[in-house]
Image (cartoon, grey):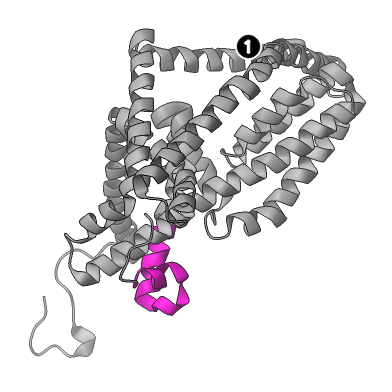
Amino acid sequence: MVRPDDGPDQVQLAGPPRVPRWLDVLTAWSWRLLIVGLAVYAAGIVAAQLRIVLLPVGIALLLATVLIPVRKLFTDRGVPVPLAMLGTVAVFFGTVFFVGWVIVPPLIDEFSGLDTTLETAADDVQEWLIDGPLGLSEDFVVDARERIEDAADSASVSEGAVVDGATLAGEVLAGLLLALVVTFFVVKDGPMMQRALLSRFSEPRQVQLRAAGNGAWRALGGYLRGAAALGVIEGVVIGATMLIVGANLALPVAALTFVSAFFPFVGAIAAGIIAVSVTLVTAGSAAAGIVAIVAIVVQQLDNDLLAPVIYGKALQLHPLVVILALTTGAAIAGIAGAFIAVPLVAVALRAGAAVRSLEEGAEDDPDAARALDTEPADP
């Protein structure tokens, strides 16, 4: 207790001493992080329950980034919007028909032998681990392989246990139809939807929302075009290398390599392992070594040289962020969730960056500068 006649040296504080400052700060951060974690967890649960709506909408937005430029090719040449939409729909279904009837059947024929080839490759790797220079215990290697296979089987069973086959088929069909409907209206009425949404906010808020929307839309389109371009490059190079060294199943491996580009980092590693495994079985260890070297070189060149140029600002994400996004998306909605997880994160970060740039000065960011236009950009 402090007495009035006490001097500076006699001041004493009543009550117990305060906790250390580091513990005070740690406690403050802990409860905040706990609340954020609970909010993220709750959002994940809600997203999982609404996956039949959210996944088709996400796929529709990805499709729209490809189809809107097609529609603009018609409208920029004076074609009325109804006819432009008819032409866009014809291009879309023509592409689907071409892929479904010309490209997919040969791939399915070759994919039929891929499962057996990978199984043989796993047997060869197991034998090398036991009898090769590593000299691992047979029991250890066999047990590790069985654990991996059991984990994969358990994941398949648990995913199938969520709904039975008929319900799952119904969800997939409903999701595809919803994705097509949403895609059509986004491509047709995107600018009108944007104006109607922005009109509900004040002018300053409209500027911010338009900046965020423009930045997010360009990030989404940039991601999709960039992933497709890198997938084509990697697929062509690795497939051609397999053909040169005399390996079989080059076409399905090239197709898998293309698809893997939409799962950054993780997909490239998986595609490289598959390519080397198939080459090992069908062309020998020397050819597999060549394919492994080419795969590593191509992926490094893509990551270090091509990706920054192709993606630009669309995917400036640390590899750890990408891996965590893929894992979270897969945990919530399986492969489809992993597919849309990375573009979703890129869109969110790019939208936030556009708003921050707008607050700092519109001239510093082209997306923010476009947000000041009186006419909103195509969504």
Task: Name the spot of residue 124 as percent of width and height, x first.
Answer: 80, 14
**223 within the magenta span:** no
Residue in the image at 59% along x and 42% along y: 264
Q: Is residue 151 found left or right of 187 in the rendered image?
A: right
Residue 279, quarter of picture: top right
Residue 201, quarter of picture: bottom left
> Predominant secondary structure in magenta?
helix
Residue in the image at 42% along x and 51% along y: 79
Between residue 135 and residue 78, name the one nearer to us.
78
Crowdedness near tag 1: few (<14), some (14–19) or many (≥20) residues, C-alpha within 10 Å = few
Query: Where 151 sits versus 84, above or below?
Result: above
Between residue 286 and residue 100, name the one nearer to us.
100
Residue in the image at 77% along x and 31% along y: 239
Q: Can residue 220 be seen in the rendering of this structure?
A: yes
**366 within the magenta span:** yes
Q: Can residue 140 be seen in the rendering of this structure?
A: no
Task: Name the spot of residue 296 as percent of width and height, x first.
Answer: 77, 41
Task: Name the spot of residue 193 as percent of width and height, x first.
Answer: 26, 51
Tell me the quadrant of the picture where the N terminus can be found: bottom left
Between residue 132 and residue 63, name the one nearer to us.
63
Q: Give the range drawn in magenta.
A: 349-372
Residue in the image at 34% along x and 15% along y: 170
Tell me the quadrant of the picture where the C terminus can be found: bottom left
Give the SS element for disc 1: helix
Query: Where 349 sits versus 84, above or below?
Result: below
Task: Name the spot of residue 268 as percent of width and height, x first.
Answer: 66, 37
Q: In the orientation shown, which residue stands out farthest toward the left?
A: 4
Please, what is the three-letter code of the amino acid marked with disc 1? Glu
Q: Mark 1 = which residue?
A: 146
